[in-house]
Image (spheres, helix red, strand yellow):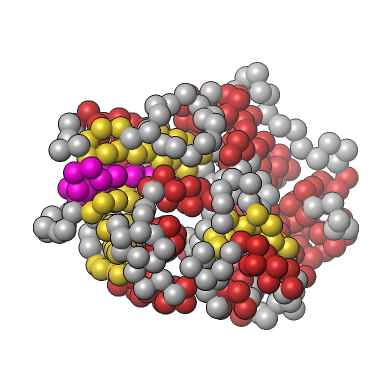
Amino acid sequence: MNTRNVAYNVLLDIEQNGAYSALALNKAIKKNNLNRLDSAFVSALVYGVLERKLTLDYIIKQYSKIPLRKIETKTKVILRLGILQLIFMDKIPESAAVNESVNLAKKHKLQKSSGFVNGILRSITRAEEKYKLPDRNIDFDYYLSVKYSCPTDIINMWRKSYGDEVAVGLLESLSGRPSLTARVNTVKTTADKLIEELNAEGVTAEKSGVIENAITLKNTGSVESLSAFKSGKLYIQDTASQLCVKALNPQPNDLVYDVCSAPGGKALTSAQYMKNRGKVVAFDIYDHKLKLIDATAKRLGLNCIKTSIRNAQTDKEDMLLADKVLCDVPCSGLGILSRKPEIRYKEDILSPQLPKLQYEILCNSSRLVAVGGTLIYSTCTLNPAENNENAERFLNEHNNFEPLKIKLNLEHCISEKENMLTLFPHFHFTDGFFISAFRRVR
């Protein structure tokens, strides 16, 4: 099995078909029946290229006489893989990086490109200075873009919104795989018992320092194959999402609405805070996603969760008013770029239409909150237009709500109001996330 060919096929699927990295990678690993070592190498290649795509293309431009836009996509993918191995993966011999890249070109009937690939990669092996970054004093955004492989429009927005220190910290957090975090199903077990059980299975598990009943995992292999997973004692959920539910503060016998629920993690965590007493209704517009939530709730033994099809933006039906409403809206995903590196290259990533959609969902969802009840608005992005500005506008236009202080005992990285909290990966050691809280007063 040629692991580089597996990585090539995954990257091509992402490049040409818009496939999601995690799904495409998992599918390829299963299809090719890769062992743990080969899976790790393929993952390193795929995520390495995705995390450094702009940097790799910048290096190609320095060595190629053919303009980047005229190089065939298949050839570009092979070059990116080759350069990644030569410059950024120090345990791979140069000869292997070059020869295997040339073989890849030949395997995919790119005979004309094989010499081109060989020439560029061998030029890199001979160069004393492999590449030179742009002059930071001439164009700082472009310098950061090439260094951290992030589009300049995102960098410019982060610098203007959060300042240079936070922006650079964010950019530095983009490379490398983030830690895998699970939520302990407190209805079935405790953190201490679960860690002991996981350790017996060869998994390195320890308590998170960010929030109770969160554990970080290493050496898991396939999480779904763990006995603790099968028996419903854990599920994967980042600490940011767990903090969001803690801010919601669901209590036993509450009625909770999760209006954009899929994949359902926050509904599951809410049910645990409620000790499986009361009712959590998980809404989504897709039936197949609701069936997955039903299946997970059953595995976890959480029978207070119900699912229902509903469009959070447009549905206006009369419903029983809820004690707690969680409005975790679709967003640009700028807080999870280390998990999904490919989305940073989407052309419409900063679309002005998205904040408009989010605001409409927030306003429509506010109708479902009982007087005295709590409304949480959240995203997994880092863009004030989608976050603080929507929250500010909501309070300005809805005098039946007041700001509700977020009590999470976490330090703020930026200056913001007490009912808002932006979580930053490099500062809070979570996904990038935004939480805002409101109380209905009349």
The answer to whether residue 371 is magenta is yes
The image shows residue 312 at horizontal and vertical percentages of: 24, 55
Q: Which residues are magenta?
A: 358-378
- Quadrant (top left, top right, bottom left, bottom right) of the C terminus: top left
Q: Position of residue 298 (x, y in %)?
A: 42, 77
Q: Is residue 346 above or below residue 150?
A: below
Q: Check the image and report above or below for 137 versus 418.
A: above
Task: Give the residue at x 39% y 49%.
Answer: 249
Total numbered labels: 0
Q: Is 34 one of the magenta-colored residues?
A: no
Side of 390 relative to 418 (left or right): left
From the viewer's side, name the closer residue of 230 and 18. 230
In the image, taking residue 344 as reference, residue 328 lies left or right, namely left
Q: Is residue 16 visible?
A: no
User: Which residue is situated farthest in the left direction here?
Assistant: 318
Asked whether residue 138 is in view, the answer is: yes
- Please say if 134 is above or below 433: above
Q: Quadrant of residue 61?
A: top right
Give the answer, above or below, for where 13 lies relative to 29: above
